[in-house]
Amino acid sequence: MSPGVILAQTSAFSGEATQLVARAGLVAKVVLVILLLFSIVSWAIILFKGAVLHRAHSHSQAFIDIFRRSSKFSEVNAVCGQLRASPLVGVFQAGYAEVNQQVRSAAPGAGGAAARPTVRSLESLSRALARAAGVEQTRLERRLSFLATTASVTPFVGLFGTVWGIMNAFEAIGGSGSASLAVVAPGISEALITTAMGLAAAIPAAVFYNFYASRIRVLSAMLDDFALEFLNIVERNFT
């Protein structure tokens, strides 16, 4: 099939869809506007969240490599600003601040000599890491609930438009006393186009919600593993 034929068919389909929308009633148009808004916002979140999670994953991989190669927490802290997209950075900085606070408040050694840096409470450190991990988890999941809402709600919004279009079709049959195609076509067209728009909004939202949720679970597992690794290092070196 030549490109000219494909272009002509595409233009014809687009023109038919535009005519269907133009012939739709007020209720159907309101439903279509609502579904269009859901779709636009969903795609904006899909694109934004995809970029955010990609950066979070790549920065996390780089951060964990630096963390395991470094011999001092201060060296790791120096690169945190460059890898801010990683949720591990927030957890590390919370743990690092807690360790510093406990070390500074430790009692001096005998004769006023500087004591070996010591962490007094691993439980407090564990709570600080858990709080930071919760904050980072919430940040990763931000705006994702809208995709779940779109996936679950828009098919029913489209179904409302479908039911309304079928009601109009039956009303037209009752008013004219005829069930010819010319009588029922406007109502059926309203029903079909709202159904199609509802599915067009719901399907991408459902697919990307599940995809992003799985990526967030991977990052959450990295958060838990990192918190345990941080605790182990502190226990070996500061207790």
Image (cartoon, rainbow, N blue to C red):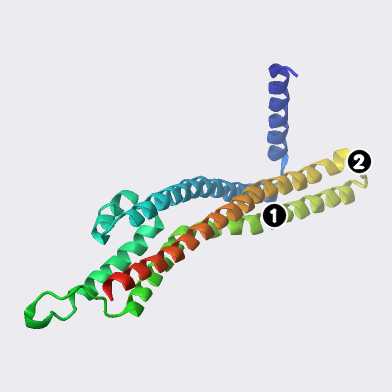
Q: Residue at point 9% right, 76% down? A: 113
Q: Residues within 10 Å of mark 2 (few under 14, many from 20)?
A: few
Residue 180's mark? 2
Q: Can residue 85 be seen?
A: no
Please name the amino acid that badge 2 sits on.
Ser
Q: Secondary structure at mark 1?
A: helix
- Image quadrant in which you'd find residue 4: top right
Q: Residue at point 34% right, 67% down? A: 233
Q: Can residue 233 be seen?
A: yes
Please name the amino acid that badge 1 sits on.
Pro
Q: Give the mark toward the camera: 1 or 2.
A: 1
In this view, 162 is above or below 113: above
1 sits to left or right of 117: right
Q: Secondary structure at mark 2?
A: loop
- Image quadrant in which you'd find residue 154: bottom right
The percent position of residue 109, horizontal first and vertical second, equals 13, 80
